[in-house]
Image (cartoon, rainbow, N blue to C red):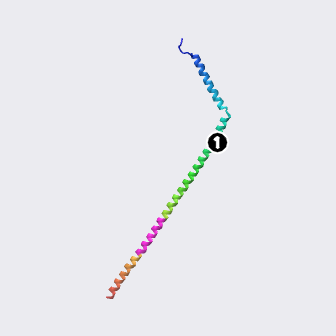
């Protein structure tokens, strides 16, 4: 004989009752119409959140594309400005070279005329 008050059979029956009660409680919750409403509301809000997330992703992609276009335009503008500055610099250098040549030719002509006068 055992010193335990509830014997093995009683403990097994109590555990089976507890499992059955838990199962009934679960079935009652699953059959609750309020639960179905909550699940429907949760599904609808999840769909709304997903739609908002998609809209934000699209807006972010569009903003990224606009920023890339602006960056390309800025690069093109900078390249055009650099080209313009280079052309102006070359033109100034050509004008300066022409002035130097004219001054050199004038000095040469003056030297030539001095030697002819002698």
Residue 105 picture location, percent across and down:
38, 80
Q: Nearer the viewer, residue 47 or 19?
A: 19
Q: Locate the N terminus and report the quarter of the image it occupies.
A: top right
Q: Residue at x 60, y 20 (%)?
A: 14
Indicate yes or no whether the magenta region holds residue 109.
Answer: no
Q: Mark 1: few, some, or many residues within 10 Å (few <14, many ≥20)?
A: few
Q: Nearer the viewer, residue 49 or 58?
A: 49
Name, please, the residue furthest toward the top: 1
**Residue 6: horizontal and vertical position, in percent?**
57, 16
Task: Write the residue at 36% across / 81% down.
Answer: 107
**Quick check: 12 above or below 91?**
above
Query: In the image as oriented, which residue stretches furthest toward the left?
Result: 118
Q: Bounds of the magenta span?
A: 81-97
Classify 52 as above or below 68. above
Q: Check disc 1 and report the residue beneath it.
A: 44
Residue closer to the observer: 114 or 24: 24
Quadrant of residue 96 within the rendered picture: bottom left
The residue that appears at 59% across and 17% down in the rendered structure is: 10
| 93 within the magenta span | yes
Q: Residue furthest front?
A: 5
Q: Main secondary structure of the magenta part?
A: helix
Q: Tag 1's secondary structure?
A: helix
Task: Report the side of 118 relative to 10 (left or right).
Answer: left
Q: For the C terminus, give its image quadrant.
A: bottom left
């Amino acid at each position: 004989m055992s010193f335990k008050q509830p014997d093995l059979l009683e403990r097994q029956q109590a555990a089976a009752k507890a499992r059955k009660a838990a199962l009934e409680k679960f079935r009652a919750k699953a059959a609750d119409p309020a639960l179905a409403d909550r699940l429907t509301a949760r599904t609808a809000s999840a769909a709304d959140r997903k739609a908002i997330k998609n809209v934000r992703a699209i807006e972010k992609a569009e903003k990224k594309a606009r920023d890339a276009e602006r960056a390309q335009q800025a690069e093109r503008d900078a390249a055009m400005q650099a080209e313009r500055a280079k052309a102006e610099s070359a033109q100034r250098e050509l004008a300066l070279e022409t002035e130097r040549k004219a001054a050199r030719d004038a000095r040469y002509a003056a030297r030539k005329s001095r030697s002819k006068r002698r």
